[in-house]
Amino acid sequence: MPRRRQSHEPGHRRKFLIVIDDTPECDRAVHYAARRAARTGGALVMLSVLELAEVQSQWLGVADLMRAEATDKAEQRQEHFAARARALAGIDCERIVAEGGIGEEIIKLVEADQDIAILVLATGTGKEGPGPLVSALASGGWTGLSVPITIVPGGLSDEDIDALA
């Protein structure tokens, strides 16, 4: 059974978790979460997950290089979105890079940090569907997630998101 959230206890802050990836909808989730966190006195946690299954089959030196390159790319993407969150809402972000499966890493982080109160995702707007994260969620692959999920429509403008958040 998951532990009780502590985000409203003295000395704690409500955190919004956003997954940072290379999808276009990631920006919509960041925008909404940053605005919402600022308006509610909350904080942001950015999670980038390196899914490096192919690394296991490489020589040690090659695997280390692949892991380092993927980590560097994830950190650059996080820096970009952290700067966006600062510009949008004047807040800084906690940044985490993990390696594994996306669903497992989200659940692991939520269970480890009792201040995370909401996972924010956004839908894709392309013909290929709602995006990889929303699709994974809809397929039931994230059983055990113990926080609510806010799904932001990917087609919303900045102004629309500002009005909602």
Image (cartoon, rainbow, N blue to C red):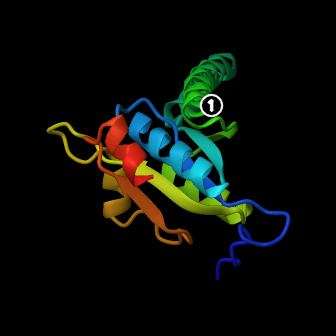
Q: Dot 1, how many residues are within 10 Å of its Cα: few (below 14), some (14-19), or many (20+)?
A: some
Residue beneath the point at 49% across and 68% down: 148
The residue beneath circle 1 is 86
Residue 152 in the image: above or below residue 60: below
Residue 68 image position (x, y, % from top left): 66, 21
Residue 95 in the image: state x and y as whole percent. 68, 38
Element type where label 1 sits in the image: helix
| 12 or 143, nearer to the observer | 12
Tell me which residue sits at (56%, 23%) in the image.
80
Q: Is residue 133 visible?
A: no
**Amino acid residing under circle 1:** Arg
Q: Quadrant of the N terminus?
A: bottom right
Work out whether 60 lies above or below 51. above
- Viewer-closest of 118 and 141: 118
At 38% from the left and 49% from the top, the residue drawn is 163
Residue 16's image quarter? Answer: bottom right
Extreme residue in the left direction? 127
Question: Relative to residue 4, is residue 135 depicted above or below?
Answer: above
User: What percent of the width, then of the height, locates residue 97?
Assistant: 65, 37
Residue 7 is left or right of residue 99, and the answer is: right
Q: How many marks?
A: 1
Does residue 17 appear in the picture of this structure? yes
Q: Is residue 164 left or right of residue 44?
A: left
Residue 86 figure quarter: top right
Which percent across, then down, holds residue 36? 53, 51
Q: At x 55% / y 43%, what residue is drawn?
A: 34
Q: Is residue 129 above or below residue 74?
A: below
Residue 11 relative to residue 78: left or right? right
Q: Which residue is farthest right? A: 11
